[in-house]
Amino acid sequence: MEKLVNDFSVGLFFWQTLLFLVLLFLLRKYAWKPILKAVNDRESSIEDALNSAARAREEMEQLKSDNQKILNEARAERDNILKEAREIKESIIAEAREKAGTEANKIIEQAQEQIENQKMAAITELKNQVAEMSIQIAEKILRDELGNQEKQSALVQEQLKDFKLN
């Protein structure tokens, strides 16, 4: 330290101080303003970027909520469409069952009517055949019975008595 104090020169100190002040003046005049301007510009661009990022984040959140809302609406609409489709399917099936039941009842009724008609035709045919056979049998019996004149008179007398009683 002694050497520093011994070697101290006022002239050198003056020139160094003067050069330092000139350097400070030059730096302030030509470098300090552009550096401060660049720093301020950088600061404002960073601030703008942060604001833009915040706005973008808010927009993204808004889009997310809108997307969720649209998605929920789409799901609700899908559920409604599926519900309507199920109802239509069930109504078509019920209508088809009802129509099939009606057709089956018509077919059964027609079959029963045909069976009844065929039954009546068969009974009528059978009665006709029985009547025809009865007439033929009666005719044969009457020929045998009425071949004799006495039996014929007795039969007529008997029938007349029955008519008078009635």
Image (cartoon, rainbow, N blue to C red):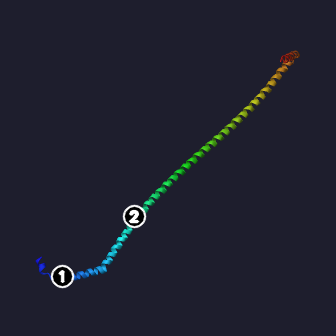
In the picture, the disc for residue 13 is: 1
Asked if 110 appears above or below 24 in the picture, the reply is above
Side of 42 relative to 6 (left or right): right
Say above or below: 34 vs 133: below
Question: What residue is shown at x 60% (from left), y 43% (from top)?
Answer: 94
Q: Position of residue 32 (x, y in %)?
A: 30, 77
Residue 1 in the image: x percent, y percent?
Answer: 12, 76
Whole-Å distance between the Cαs marked 2 and 1? 54 Å
**Residue found at x 37% / y 68%:** 47
Q: Residue at x 44, y 59 (%)?
A: 64
Name the residue that disc number 2 marks.
54
- N-terminal of the pair, mark 2 or mark 1, is 1
Measured as percent of width and height from the top left, residue 125 is found at: 76, 30
Q: Nearer the viewer, residue 14 or 122?
A: 14
In the picture, measured across the screen, residue 44 lies left or right of residue 79, that is: left
Front residue of 141/34: it is: 34
Specify the amino acid type for callout 1.
Phe
Q: How many residues crowd mark 2 within 10 Å: few (<14), some (14–19), many (20+)? A: few
What's the amino acid at mark 2? Ala
- Identify which residue, 117 or 68, lies in the foreground: 68
Q: Quadrant of the C terminus?
A: top right
Q: Residues within 10 Å of mark 1 (few under 14, many from 20)?
A: few
- Quarter of the image for residue 48 reads bottom left
Where is residue 2 drawn, in percent x and y? 11, 77
Q: Secondary structure at mark 2?
A: helix
Q: Is residue 52 above or below residue 87?
A: below
Is residue 74 shown left or right of residue 142?
left
